[in-house]
Amino acid sequence: MSYKALYRKYRPKSFSDVKGQDHIVETLKNVVINHKISHGYLFCGPRGVGKTSLAKIFANIINCYHLEDVTKLCENCLNNLNSNLDIIEMDAASNNGVDSIRELKEKIEHLPTKGNYKVYIIDEVHMLSKGAFNALLKTLEEPPAHAIFILATTDPQKIPPTIISRLQRFNFRRISTNTIVNQLTEILEKENIKFDSKVLYYIARLATGGMRDALSITEQANAYGNGEIKLKDVIYAFGITSNQQLISLANNLFRNLTEESIKEFTLLKESGIDPKEFVISFIDLFKDYIIYQKTNDKAFLDLLIDEEIQELTINYDFAQKAIEFLYKLNKELFYTDNYFQLIEIYLIKISEINKDNKSIKNLNNNGNIENMNFKENKNNQDTFEKVIATTQELVVQVNQNENNIEAIEDDILTGVFDSIDNEVIIDTRELGIQSEILNTKTTIIPAFEEKYKKIDKFESNYSKEELIKALYICDIQSRSNFDAYLQILIGDNLLNEYSDLARAFSEVKIKAAGNNFLVLTSDNLPILNYLSNIENKENVQNLLKQYFKTTVRLILCEKNWFKEIALSIKKEREMNPNKPKPQFDQFTNIEIEKELSPSKQLFDKLNF
């Protein structure tokens, strides 16, 4: 048969051909250069990552006499790579008995025919029986000087520790997506096979880190496309879900659009998706989002690319809760035969994460905001006490005698405003802000820059005294209103051009609020420095005013600093409960930094 499968045709023949295992290649090169060749090696790792190929390359190199470079095979040995009489390859899956090992022990005494060593490569060594391992044990401990063993396995935990302790163990890694994509690109260009630009990332995803699997999938996709590899063909033939479909589903779930979400999933189900692959891909999507929110580094993305991350209109808290549900779902799939039914149940659970969040619920299919109104709450007399009472980060559990109190550490000020009066509701009939946003000219918001990642500390623009003042004059209703408005700002699709600002706000938490100020905390220093640098800029305040109905003073605090001050206030109040509260005036309006008009800024950028 003249035709060779791609994975056979492009099997590595030298150290330089091995991809994704640089740590092992470098070690074996040093072994050869320094002539410190051990009697036994154990190659462990998943399928298709180069274990057997590297074993053959290493075995041939140590038996090559014609070396100018001791880490490279000569032309003659390269041509005889698979026919060297001194390299014996044995499949332990079909030769797993004691008799096979005894036969091996008899042959091992024979001297090499041409090379320096007789090399025995035993593939899938974990398949040997217990008796076979015992028979091999003594030979591995005291082999002849001319014998070298290279054992390869995908399941090292099945190998007895007494065997492993007599070998040098090398752990092969799954090959990264970028490495697989680069290798596939090179091979397809050599083969003159046309392919879509994004399709290789989907193939790498299917291969789960195995180069051999990637080449086999590529070959099958090429056959299906009759000489051309198309993304739609790979999605259809292998039952995978496209990134765009996953993004759309995630956005609908975030907005509590349960019916639309189930319709989308039904279409995916009818297209023949693999349910387990769908769940894993959905987990990867939320994992990519969470990591990107914390690092702002696209190098950590496995499933999505930078542009696709920007299309997600979810927030950090939703992603965390959704991924917890999906991990439970992935575990439960093991115990059921009706995969799709179980997935639909969990999709409904995920869509209900924001069920009680009115600001999210009122987002329609386009991510737009329907009419909203927040009623005023004039009864804020006990606001300060309620705020300070929860700054200790304690959940208090009182027993029947009200004497046994257990303190459990929690997030600062979490749940402060959970007990808002029932009359504080959202009415979707009275006030519309969508037309205001649609009619507003696009403003230029400063982008999040790399320089913020290099700043390892944050100094608030506000003093300790100003923060204390904010905590004394804050009120619950302002906090409730601003929190809802902020969620709208973050989730609004109209803010795609302001994605850096929206992502930054998703990283902070509102701890207190007044008529014209917000106390925001986070432990993300780059985000705090970014917001601190742009908070008073005219374009930023104009955008905030569209949502908050006023210019807003952002009192930004590093989480631990806020915690210290809040706890100190609480202790002081506990020590002097009868001491009257200090009186403070309200904050004045902020001084806005004037900026050029959007058209002028754009003109200046184009002429830079």
Image: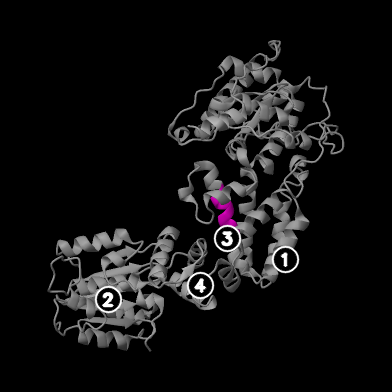
210 relative position to 331: left or right: left
Q: Quadrant of the N terminus?
A: bottom left
Between discs 3 and 4, the one toward the N terminus: 4
Rounded to the nearest angstrom, the CA distance separating label 3 from label 4 is 25 Å
Rate crowding at label 3 as few (under 14), some (14 to 19) or many (20 or more) other CA atoms within 10 Å. many
The residue that label 3 is drawn on is: 281
Foreground: 9 or 473? 9
Q: Are marks 2 and 4 in contact (CB under 8 Å)?
A: no
Q: Is residue 136 magenta?
A: no
Vertical placement of 607 versus 462: above or below? below
The residue that label 4 is drawn on is: 228
Tag 4's secondary structure?
Answer: strand
Q: Point out residue 482 in the picture as x, y percentages from the top left corner.
A: 72, 30
Q: Point out residue 383 in the picture as x, y percentages from the top left corner.
A: 74, 22
Q: Amino acid at mark 4?
A: Glu
The residue that label 2 is drawn on is: 137
Vertical placement of 466 versus 375: above or below? above
Between discs 4 and 1, the one toward the N terminus: 4
The residue that label 1 is drawn on is: 266
Nearest to the eye among marks 3 and 4: give it: 4
Between discs 2 and 4, the one toward the N terminus: 2
The quarter of the picture where residue 390 lies is top right
